[in-house]
Image: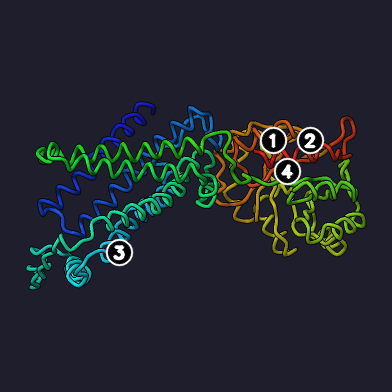
């Protein structure tokens, strides 16, 4: 597999280096009309993304910033890379055509005879828009005569003004590229939750402006050098050499962007949120709310030391109303039990232990009208077999450590499990919680390995030797660790 990955990387970088030259030479020799040249640019864009993906993946691996429990970077054919490719394609194309578009506007503003220039542009794209091609041979085959482009007078251009427009527009477009392109290395760090606005926020400031300026300067300098007489005599090799340098410039800027995104000092948005379960007193509820948890759990299971009566829970839920999501934990509940509970306690959702599986979760959701978080007990990979069905029947998933055979509690046993097995779970886009042996000391590592939507803790924030009694200091420490993760 390693040999295949290495061979694919060599192929990707090699093709990315020569593909722009192939498109350019094809257009120059008439083998490609405008339509097919654009198709060729689409291929170039995908190759550039694949090259950037592989390079930033290796950077993330060396800097130990790989997320999702991975030991090696996801290949360019993985789901995370394919999602990134769609966005990367749009970013590169927006950059290319944004710069071209602004340059065209600059030409119109600085060209003395704008009517002739506009006529030239119109004839270049008019046939393409109307007939799908501007190749005279293809147009002749359908009985259409290609419109000749008006001759342009180069002396009519205010050259200094045009260069100024190109430079200013180049920096603006390059700045957009630098900030948005940060999503590529960010997806290695956070495979499930790497959004463009996260990347935009993480790669701002003077560093982004400096990188954008460097991109424009290196692109302009390369264009100037390769237009010197020394290089113009190289023929087709000139295009190939220019193409290779373009890839070097692109990957160098990508390296600068990734260097920022993969550093320990960069501030990224919270990668997950927290639920504190087993709350029984108003004081602890206030500690949970004031320190940033998004969900609070109340246990309705008599064998649990965290069990709370419906009357007490009703008062706590009233205290929490509108301030935090209120979750009721129930174990193998009957419909009658749920009816009695919900008649007294105003809950926002249910966290359900049910051995009957997906059908029971769906039935509870339909009966109560509340969102259901389905608990999945995990010890090994085989315990995840039903996840694909369960996630369709529930609104969310909670993965907890599988209790020992003689345990009285289905959860909250302060037991952990190998989080790496969750990489095999068919979770899709379903929001999910990670539980099982989490503490203020280990929650950051658990988040880095599994990339959960939420973490859930109960015993990990209790006073030493006092099961069921929460510790406000531990709650603060746990939520602070989640916020920093």
The first of marks 3 and 4 along the sequence is 3
Residue 355 locus on image (x, y percent): 71, 47
Contact flag, marks 4 and 1 (Cβ < 8 Å): no
| Left or right: residue 311 compared with residue 413 | right
Q: Please determine whether, in this image, residue 132 is positioned above or below residue 445.
A: below
The first of marks 3 and 1 along the sequence is 3
Give me the disc on residue 212: none
Contact flag, marks 1 and 2 (Cβ < 8 Å): yes
Give me the disc on residue 460: 2
Q: Quadrant of residue 316?
A: bottom right
The first of marks 3 and 2 along the sequence is 3
The first of marks 4 and 1 along the sequence is 1
| Left or right: residue 399 compared with residue 27 | right
Disc 3 to disc 2, how far (Cα)? Answer: 62 Å
Q: Residue at x 26, y 63 (%)?
A: 110
Q: Residue at x 38, y 27 (%)?
A: 2
Q: Nearer the viewer, residue 375 or 468?
A: 468
Contact flag, marks 3 and 1 (Cβ < 8 Å): no
The first of marks 1 and 2 along the sequence is 1
Residue 416 locus on image (x, y percent): 71, 32
Question: Of helix, strand and loop, which one carries label 1?
Answer: helix
Residue 300 seen from this side: yes
Disc 3 to disc 4, how far (Cα)? Answer: 55 Å
Question: Of helix, strand and loop, which one carries label 3?
Answer: helix
Labels 4, 1: front one:
1
Q: Quadrant of residue 215?
A: top left
Give me the disc on residue 105: 3
């Amino acid at each position: 597999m390693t040999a295949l990955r290495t061979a694919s990387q060599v192929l990707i970088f090699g093709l990315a280096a020569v593909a722009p030259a192939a498109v350019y030479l094809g257009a120059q020799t008439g083998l490609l009309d405008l339509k097919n040249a654009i198709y060729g640019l689409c291929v170039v864009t995908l190759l550039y993304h694949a090259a950037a993906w592989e390079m930033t993946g290796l950077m993330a691996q060396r800097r130990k910033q790989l997320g999702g429990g991975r030991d090696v970077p996801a290949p360019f054919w993985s789901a995370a890379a394919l999602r990134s490719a769609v966005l990367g394609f749009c970013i590169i194309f927006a950059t290319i055509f944004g710069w071209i578009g602004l340059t065209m506007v600059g030409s119109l503003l600085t060209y003395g005879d704008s009517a002739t220039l506009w006529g030239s542009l119109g004839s270049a794209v008019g046939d393409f828009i109307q007939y799908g091609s501007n190749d005279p041979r293809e147009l002749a085959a359908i009985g259409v005569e290609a419109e000749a482009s008006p001759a342009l007078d180069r002396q009519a251009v205010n050259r200094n003004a045009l260069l100024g427009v190109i430079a200013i527009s180049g920096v603006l477009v390059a700045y957009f590229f630098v900030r948005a392109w940060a999503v590529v290395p960010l997806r290695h760090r956070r495979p499930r939750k790497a959004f463009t606005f996260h990347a935009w926020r993480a790669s701002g400031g003077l560093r982004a402006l400096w990188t954008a300026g460097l991109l424009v300067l290196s692109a302009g300098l390369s264009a100037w050098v390769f237009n010197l007489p020394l290089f113009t005599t190289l023929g087709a090799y000139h295009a190939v050499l220019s193409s290779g340098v373009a890839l070097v410039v692109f990957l160098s800027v990508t390296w600068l962007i990734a260097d920022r995104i993969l550093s320990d000092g960069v501030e990224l948005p919270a990668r997950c949120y927290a639920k504190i379960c087993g709350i029984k007193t108003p004081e602890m509820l206030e500690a949970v709310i004031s320190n940033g948890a998004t969900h609070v759990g109340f246990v309705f299971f008599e064998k649990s030391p965290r069990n709370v009566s419906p009357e007490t829970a009703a008062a706590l839920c009233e205290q929490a109303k509108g301030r935090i999501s209120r979750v009721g934990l129930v174990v193998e509940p009957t419909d009658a039990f749920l009816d009695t509970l919900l008649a007294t306690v105003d809950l926002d959702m249910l966290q359900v232990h049910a051995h009957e599986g997906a059908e029971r979760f769906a039935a509870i959701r339909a009966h109560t009208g509340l969102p259901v978080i389905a608990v999945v007990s995990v010890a090994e990979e085989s315990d995840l077999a039903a996840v694909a069905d369960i996630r369709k029947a529930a609104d969310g998933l909670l993965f907890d450590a599988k209790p020992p055979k003689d345990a009285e509690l289905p959860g909250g046993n302060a037991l952990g499990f190998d989080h790496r097995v969750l990489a095999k779970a068919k979770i899709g886009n379903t929001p999910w919680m990670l539980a099982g042996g989490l503490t203020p000391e280990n929650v950051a590592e658990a988040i880095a390995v599994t990339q959960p939507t939420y973490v859930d803790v109960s015993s990990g924030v209790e006073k030493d030797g006092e099961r069921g009694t929460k510790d406000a200091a531990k709650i603060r420490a746990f939520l602070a660790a989640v916020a920093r993760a």
